[in-house]
Image: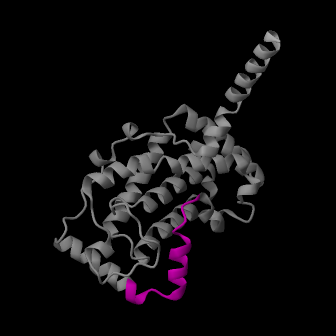
Amino acid sequence: MKTISRLCLAALIAVSIASAPLAQAKEGKPYLAAKDLDLSSLLPPPPVSGSMKENEELAEVLRLQVTRSPDMVAQAQADATEDIWRFAGVVGPAFKSERLPKLTAFFIRVLASEGPLTDPAKELWKHPRPHQYSDLVKPVVKLSKSYSYPSGHATAGTLMAVVLANMLPEKRQEIMQRAAEYADNRLVAGIHFRSDIEAGRLAGTLIAATLMTRADFNADFEAARNELRAELGLPAMTALTALSQ
């Protein structure tokens, strides 16, 4: 009986070890922690509250508030969702979670890496959102409890776009344009200032560059890229062909 118990225990340990990467993916374990990249030392500070720059940015938000069409509002509300599938329109109809399990798990972890890096910067600067700065601003998306600078959505959108464009260099221009629209829709929604968006784009690029230095990220990236390109009917890529694009 003791022998059987030991065998059962060994089997359970083996199963738990084998399933660890899958569990990490399902739980969205971040590739990066706050210690891996100090955005507050790399981003410029936000505009000072009450400054001319801040008031100019408020004026832009208010202009958009009175000129945005129902279609613009609907798109901004749809883009309030943070996931890679917001790029389906430029990738194609085969770009679906149920068809791409490796890519799905991979981007969950990529997105999970954004918050631990942007949250400390938000807390440092404690920059108010437009509706907190002026009662005239009426956002059309769910309000957030976090501070405004840098924009987490702009960071996430840029981060996803850089990584996805590296998988699909044939569609790089379209992917990056979609990321720009995704970020700008936070202005349309009335939930961010222009400087928040610009800082988010820079933050997303910096996070992507940092991720590319990690062996675990690169291993998962290659597997997800191969799955995606096969599903889209595109030729496989090597590191050399990726650099030549």
In-front residue for pair 160/192: 192
Residue at image coords 54%, 77%: 75
> What secondary structure characterizes most of the magenta part?
helix
In the shown orientation, is residue 202 left or right of residue 75?
A: left
Asked if residue 74 is among those painted magenta in the image, a careful observer would answer: yes
Residue at image coords 33%, 42%: 38
Residue 140, compared with residue 243, is above or below; it is below
Q: Quadrant of residue 59?
A: bottom left
In the shown orientation, is residue 79 left or right of residue 197?
A: right
Residue 85 in view (yes/no): yes
Q: Quadrant of residue 137?
A: bottom left
Query: Magenta residues?
Result: 65-83
In-front residue for pair 5/42: 5
Residue at image coords 65%, 35%: 21
Residue 134, compared with residue 11, is above or below; it is below
Query: Which x, y percent locates residue 199?
Result: 34, 58
Residue farthest to the front, as pictured: 1
What color scheme is it?
one colour
Q: Quadrant location of the N terminus?
A: top right
Query: Which x, y percent locates residue 159?
Result: 49, 53
Query: Which x, y percent locates residue 235?
Result: 74, 48
Query: Which x, y percent locates residue 157?
Result: 50, 60
